[in-house]
Amino acid sequence: MKILIVEDNEAIAQGLKVSLEAENYQVDISNTMQSAREKISQNCYHLMIFDILLPDGNGIYLCKEVKHNYDIPILFLTAKDKEQDIINGLNVGADDYIVKPFRIGELLARIHNALRKYKKTASLLKIEDITIDLEHNRIEKGKQEVTLTSLEWRIFLMLLNARGNIVTRDRLLNLVYDISGNFINDNSLTVYIKRLREKLEDDINHPKIIKTIKGIGYKIENE
């Protein structure tokens, strides 16, 4: 399972990484909100751990942003220990709130509990004849590997993380711009969706994986 730590204190971040990897988790570290956004756009995480005070912003806003776009458990790990801080963190959708200093055993137990609730145990997803390896960012159609460009992968991952729900065209356009810094217009998005379908679908005129919700956006079914 893959975890993202968003923490600007290098000693704490590296200590967490060592402890979590000893429990067989894969761990990425971001020191800023912007680098976190970039990693989120390129990877599929099972859980995230956020500090609140970050060099380029507030983890509260990052949590709210991620929760709006993805169905991923988020834990706050922060020195902000006032009651209102905890309330604010939980109100934006955090699944748990842990105050520094902390005990690693307690943190591991809370991570396990959050993952158990979300049941994000599978690293492989199957949709029709497509297999998605979330840990290695690899896609196969049948036995043939599918190669996506960086932007195609970002768009597909956004739809994949929201599977079962409609992602509007405006939301996709905003996500691509906000997270990756790549501006695409409405016509370009149509082209990228077409290219994705050409690589993933058996019949692009009757797509079974990336479905168009007329006048709204796109959807991948939650299978």
Image (spheres, grey):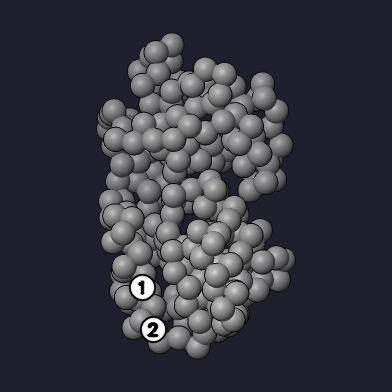
Circle 1 SS class: helix
| Quarter the N terminus occupies | bottom left
Quarter of the image for residue 46 reads bottom left
**141 on left or right of 44:** left
Which label belongs to residue 110? 1
Residue 206, percent from left and from top: 39, 13
The answer to whether residue 49 shows anywhere in this view is no
Going by the numbered disc 2, the residue's amino acid type is Ile
Instruction: Please give the name of the residue rendered at 36% of the width and 21% of the height, measured from the top-left corner.
Output: 208
Instruction: Please give the name of the residue rendered at 50% of the width and 59% of the height, measured from the top-left corner.
Output: 93
Going by the numbered disc 1, the residue's amino acid type is Arg
**43 on left or right of 117:** right
Few, some or many residues within 10 Å of mark 1 (<14, 14–19, 20+): some
Circle 2 SS class: helix
Q: Please, is residue 204 above or below residue 192 in the view?
A: above
Return the residue at label 2: 104
Q: What separation in Å lies between label 2 and label 1 (alpha carbons)?
A: 10 Å
Instruction: Please give the name of the residue rendered at 34% of the width and 46% of the height, measured from the top-left corner.
Output: 133
| Quarter the C terminus occupies | top left
Residue 104, percent from left and from top: 39, 83
Quarter of the image for residue 111 reads bottom left
Which label belongs to residue 160? none
Residue 176, percent from left and from top: 63, 40
Along the line of sight, the residue nearer the viewer: 89 or 209: 89
